[in-house]
Image (spheres, grey):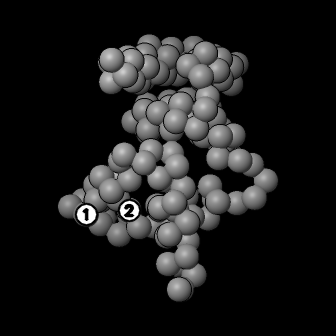
Amino acid sequence: MSRCEDHYQKGLDILARIDKDHVEAIVNSFKDSPAPDLGRLAVEFNYGQIFARPGLDLKSRLLAAVAGLTALGNTTQLKFYINGALNVGWTEEEIVEVIMQMIIYAGFPHALNTIFKVAAEVFEERRAAAK
């Protein structure tokens, strides 16, 4: 197996740990985009190289992703990472706390948008699916 193939497979394995129900949809979502190779690159690099590094466990990396995306105000990607953080064992309360911590670094608007728009939506969708 080539190095790229190895990274790609590692990336798929990590994505499956984050959100096993949507791995195929995530990968396929790039196929009809203006950059169809971007999906493969994202899997290889983001998950197969960065998320696969030693030093932090997946649970910690997902909480860091939630914090970083909150600080950047990136509500588009946050839904996936909040769901992933819940999937690997973080609680709603812990996720809200890390988002609130970002008030210090990113200000109230980013944290409020994340809590009231993204986190609330993710939590509600998960509660509805659990019924």
Specify the label residue 39 is tagged with: 2
Direction from residue 33 to residue 115 in the image, left or right: right
Q: Answer yes or no: do the residues labelled 2 and 1 have beta carbons within 8 Å? A: yes
Q: In the orientation shown, which residue stands out farthest toward the front?
A: 131
In this rendered view, identify the residue nearer to me: 78 or 95.
95
C-alpha distance separating marks 2 and 1: 8 Å
Query: Where residue 1 sits in the image (x, y, percent)?
Result: 53, 86
Asked whether the viewer can see residue 28, the reply is: yes
Asked whether the viewer can see residue 102, the reply is: no
Task: Describe the element under mark 1 as helix, strand or loop.
Answer: loop
Q: Residue at x 55, y 66 (%)?
A: 10
Assess disc 2: are there few (<14), some (14-19) or many (≥20) residues with their C-alpha within 10 Å of its C-alpha: some
For badge 2, the amino acid type reads Gly
Residue corresponding to mark 1: 31
For badge 1, the amino acid type reads Lys
Specify the label residue 79 is tagged with: none
Task: Describe the element under mark 2 as helix, strand or loop.
Answer: helix
Direction from residue 66 to residue 25 in the image, left or right: left
Q: Residue at x 39, y 36 (%)?
A: 76
Q: In the orientation shown, which residue stands out farthest toward the left?
A: 32
Direction from residue 54 to residue 20 in the image, left or right: left
